[in-house]
Image (cartoon, rainbow, N blue to C red):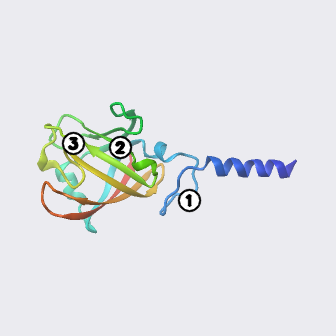
Amino acid sequence: MKKILSIFIIIILIVSCGKTYDDGPHFTFRSAQSRIEGTWKLDKLYINDIDSTNEFYNRLGCDIEFTDEIYNVSEYFWKIKLKNIKNSDIDFIGQWGFYAHNQDLVSIYFTKDSNFKIENSIGPFGSERSSVWTITKLTKDEFNMWVDFYDFYQGLGTRKFSLILKKT
């Protein structure tokens, strides 16, 4: 009886484990989507390995909310909101989802919005910007990811952005 119970517990653990990433966690019961959902504050932003956190706060200074609210008609994308944007009284809305159903990659896209000032944009955060981020760490309190991004608005070429987000 103990053997059967042990086998049953092992099977449940294997089947119910959520996606893990290189930097952790190494074991979780929660899905990647449920860990991403919520409001996050930028802890660190690196552009080409240079700490650019202050630049983010000078331009946007916002919280990032990943919701479970379906974006338009697509069942595979949910709303993302940039909230409390510096010098703005509105939230900027985009969409997020797993790229090609691969939970290592999260796609973030912001539509064209005349309310989003181009001078507030920074890298992948701005009007008509789309990027596919590689997740390196996703716990209930920390979300780390990076992307190579071409900023065609500023003509600066390809740059690597790395984010460390903390749950608020």
- Secondary structure of the residue carrying tag 3 is loop
Compare marks 2 and 1 and give the one earlier in the sequence. 1
Residue at image coords 20%, 34%: 90
Q: Are marks 2 and 3 in contact (CB under 8 Å)?
A: no
Q: Quadrant of residue 122?
A: bottom left
Q: Please identify the quadrant where the C terminus is shown.
A: top left
Residue type pointed to by label 3? Ile
Please tell me which residue lies in front, 49 or 101: 101
Circle 3 crowding by C-alpha within 10 Å: few under 14, some 14–19, many from 20: many
Q: Quadrant of residue 84?
A: top left
Compare marks 2 and 3 and give the one earlier in the sequence. 3
Q: Quadrant of residue 145?
A: bottom left
Taking the view exactly as shown, the residue that stands out farthest to the bottom is 49
Which disc, if any, is residue 85? 3
Please tell me which residue lies in front, 53 or 125: 125
The residue identified by callout 2 is 96
The residue identified by callout 1 is 26
- C-alpha span from label 2 to label 1: 24 Å
Q: Position of residue 5 (x, y in %)?
A: 80, 47
Residue type pointed to by label 2? Trp
Q: Position of residue 151 (x, y in %)?
A: 18, 57
